[in-house]
Structure formats: structure tokens, C-alpha cells
């Protein structure tokens, strides 16, 4: 009987603020292993999409771009191509329409 192939992945999350000089690491460190339990329940894409879906609500006080990259090695060499990559826009604080000014 053939056994299912198991592939471990490592991820990193980086943020670039609007007008900022470049990407900075955020999250649990430069690289973290994708939880095995998460990959039993979903594909790498599914896990990553679920993680990123939470970001705008949890990071509602910052404006810029969030970049999630997943690799097949625990520490990607410079220039390594990720097996999965997705960028999400964080809109930052929203100003609510407070209606017309009353002049007070």
C-alpha cells in the first residue's frame, strides 16, 4: 500500500509600512514551521489564506502591505523562490463619517 507523501513547510511574515524603507519580519520569528495539524486539515494554500484572512482585523491600526511566504526549507537562502506567496493590503485606521459639523 502506498503511503501519503508528507511535506513540511516553513513560513515567514513580513510587513512594509506605507512610505517605509523595506520589509521587516513580524510574527513568531524569521521562519516558523507550518503546524503539521493545520496541514492535515487543509492544503498549504488553505492554511495560508485562513491565516491572512485574520490579518486585517487584527492589524487594523497599521497601514501597509503584509507578505506571507512559504518555503520547503527551514531557512530560505537569499533569492530562494517561495512555494507559496501572497501579499495582503492593510488599510490602517478608518475614519468614520461623523456627519456634518455643527460648528461647536
Image (cartoon, rainbow, N blue to C red):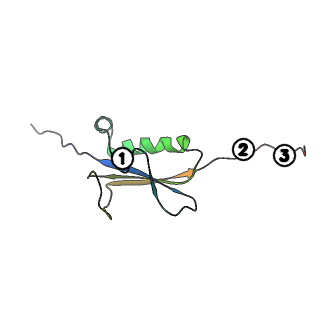
Residue drawn at 58 percent across, 44 percent down: 60
Q: Is residue 100 above or below residue 79?
A: above
Q: Are marks 1 and 2 in contact (CB under 8 Å)?
A: no
C-alpha gap between disc 1 and disc 2: 34 Å
For this orientation, the residue located farthest to the front is: 29
Crowding around mark 2 (Cα neighbors within 10 Å: few <14, some 14 to 19, many 20+) is: few
Q: List x then y, in percent, for residue 22.
A: 49, 62
Q: Secondary structure at mark 2?
A: loop
Q: Nearest to the eye among marks 1 and 2: give it.
A: 2
Query: Is residue 59 toward the left or the right of residue 29 in the image?
Result: right
Q: List x then y, in percent, for residue 35.
A: 31, 39
* Residue marked by disc 2: 96
Residue drawn at 30 percent across, 57 percent down: 76
* Residue marked by disc 3: 100
Residue drawn at 36 percent across, 46 percent down: 45
Label located before the other in sequence (1 or 2)? 1
Say which mark, if any, is on residue 88: none
In this rendering, the count of numbered labels is: 3
Q: List x then y, in percent, for residue 29.
A: 38, 47
**Res. 56 image quadrant:** top right
Pick the quarter of the image with the C terminus. top right
Residue drawn at 60 percent across, 46 percent down: 61
Q: Secondary structure at mark 1?
A: helix
Label located before the other in sequence (1 or 3)? 1
Q: Is 73 in front, or is 88?
A: 73
Q: Is 26 in front, or is 39?
A: 26
For this orientation, the residue located farthest to the right is: 103
Q: List x then y, in percent, for residue 63.
A: 58, 52
Crowding around mark 1 (Cα neighbors within 10 Å: few <14, some 14 to 19, many 20+) is: some
Q: Secondary structure at mark 3?
A: loop
C-alpha gap between disc 1 and disc 3: 45 Å
* Residue marked by disc 1: 45
Amino acid at each position: 500500500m502506498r503511503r501519503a507523501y508528507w511535506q513540511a513547510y516553513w513560513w515567514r511574515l513580513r510587513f512594509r509600512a506605507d512610505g517605509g524603507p523595506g520589509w521587516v519580519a513580524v510574527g513568531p520569528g524569521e521562519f516558523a514551521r507550518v503546524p503539521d495539524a493545520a496541514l492535515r486539515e487543509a492544503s498549504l494554500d488553505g492554511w495560508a489564506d485562513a491565516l491572512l484572512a485574520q490579518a486585517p482585523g487584527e492589524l487594523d491600526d497599521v497601514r501597509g502591505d503584509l507578505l506571507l511566504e512559504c518555503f520547503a526549507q527551514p531557512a530560505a537562502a537569499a533569492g530562494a523562490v517561495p512555494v507559496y506567496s501572497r501579499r495582503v493590503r492593510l488599510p490602517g485606521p478608518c475614519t468614520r463619517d461623523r456627519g456634518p459639523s455643527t460648528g461647536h
